[in-house]
Amino acid sequence: MSAHGAMGAPGRPSVLVAAVLVATLGFAAAAHGKPRRKPTTLLQILAKDVDAARRESAALLLGRAGNLAARPALERALAKDPAHWVRARAAEALGLLGQRKAIPALKRALGREKDQTVRKDIAQALLRLGARSGLLELMWQLKAGRNHERAAAMLAIVQATGRPLG
């Protein structure tokens, strides 16, 4: 195991952890009586799996692993996945990848997204990539959101800037 333990580099899971998670997800599906013919790679899971929880996990693992080749698949998931948690994790993963090429897809998604949790995650990804529109969205949520949305927006700004508000 690396000096960083099971996480590999700080904040990134090792390949072993990712493989164990994918295998665990497959066993959990089999235990629930679902057919075993499931997609096996994270990209296949993100694109084709019927289980939203597996797609959500795949999106996040692709981002945390730094898989730059996953950007197009994550952008598709952000644009088209019916599950809001998958869209949220796809946005988060795009921010984690750090590729500014994802900014246009994130902005398009922000323009059409209705779910406030997903909007917050898109805004955080934009902010992480250096796009001002991410901060503007979080500021709008601070002003117009419900209490929990304002709290989440405030936390996102604090995490991005490293300084408390006020």
Image (cartoon, rainbow, N blue to C red):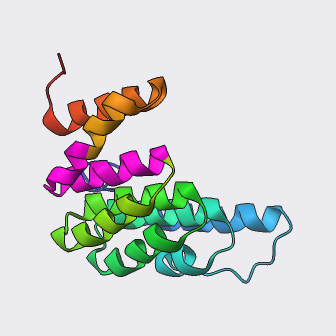
Q: Residue at x 32, y 29 (%)?
A: 143
Whether 99 is drawn above or below 154: the answer is below
Residue 155 placement (x, y as % from top left)? 31, 30
- Name the residue: 68% across, 80% down: 38
Of residues 3 and 62, the one nearer the viewer is 62
Magenta span: predominant SS is helix
Of all residues, the one furthest to the right in this rendering is: 33
Residue 52 in sight here? yes
Residue 9 shown in magenta: no
In percent of width and height, residue 149 lies at 43, 32
Q: Is residue 11 left or right of residue 39?
A: left
Do we see residue 14 in this rendering? no
Relative to 75, 86 lies left or right = right
Give the residue drawn at x 30%, y 81%: 69
Is residue 124 located in the magenta-colored stretch of the structure?
yes
Which region is colored magenta?
A: 116-136
Where residue 22 appears, as percent x and y from the top left, is 56, 67
Q: Quadrant of the C terminus?
A: top left
Vertical comparison of 35 with 152: above or below: below
